[in-house]
Image: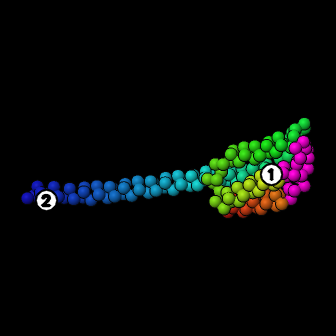
């Protein structure tokens, strides 16, 4: 009987210390795991914010690059027909758009749709300008018509850029 009593005097405090240490270590590990998860989420949020900002920058740059008045100034118009120049303009818009297609992941659906609508309106205006051309007109003639009719398109581009800027400012 004395032996059991002595054994209990040793085992009970040992068990209490063991369970206390076990619970404390478990709580510590749980807190460390939660802390690492929070840090990881903060890093992902920081990286995602940077990607979203880059997407807004790229979409604004895309809209500026497909502005008909600036696009016709960048392109070579010498000794080329209006038809060929028209095709080059459309190819440039298509290439620019395809280059920025993945940016839709990082901007809202409304902004993406506004960018698409702006692009389509620009294409429509270029096609309308081409429709006013005669078969043997030069690229310079087409450029004049495009620039003359670019005010409505420019207003649409400015509106789209404003929407993108407003959305981007909400990230901060």
Quarter of the image holding residue 109? bottom right
Q: Is residue 5 left or right of residue 53?
A: left
Instruction: Identify the residue shown where x is 61% and y is 51%.
Output: 47
Please give the range of residues in magenta: 129-151
On the question of residue 169 being in view, the answer is: no
Q: Quadrant of residue 17?
A: bottom left
Looking at the image, which residue is at 53% across and 55% down? Answer: 41
Name the chief secondary structure element in magenta.
helix
Secondary structure type for disc 1? helix
Give the residue at x 27% y 59%.
16
In the image shown, does 104 or 17 lie closer to the viewer? Answer: 104
The mark found on residue 11 in the picture is none
108 vs 24, left or right, is right
> Given the current orientation, which residue lies at the most extreme front position?
135
Of residues 13 and 142, which is closer to you in this image? 142
- Image mark for residue 127: 1
Q: Residue at x 79, y 42 (%)?
A: 88
Q: Which residue is tagged 2?
A: 5
């Amino acid at each position: 009987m004395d032996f059991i009593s002595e054994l209990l005097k040793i085992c009970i405090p040992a068990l209490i210390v063991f369970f206390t240490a076990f619970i404390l270590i478990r709580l510590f590990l749980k807190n460390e795991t939660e802390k690492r998860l929070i840090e990881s989420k903060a890093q992902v949020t920081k990286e995602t914010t940077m990607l979203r900002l880059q997407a807004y920058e790229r979409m604004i740059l895309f809209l500026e690059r497909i502005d008909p008045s600036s696009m016709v100034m960048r392109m070579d118009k010498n000794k080329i027909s209006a038809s060929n120049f028209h095709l080059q303009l459309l190819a440039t818009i298509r290439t620019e758009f395809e280059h920025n297609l993945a940016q839709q992941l990082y901007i809202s659906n409304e902004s993406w749709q506004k960018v698409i609508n702006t692009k389509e309106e620009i294409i429509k205006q270029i096609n309308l300008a081409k429709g006013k051309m005669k078969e043997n007109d030069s690229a310079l003639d087409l450029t004049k018509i495009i620039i003359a009719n670019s005010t409505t398109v420019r207003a649409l581009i400015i509106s789209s850029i404003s929407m993108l800027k407003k959305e981007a400012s909400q990230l901060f």
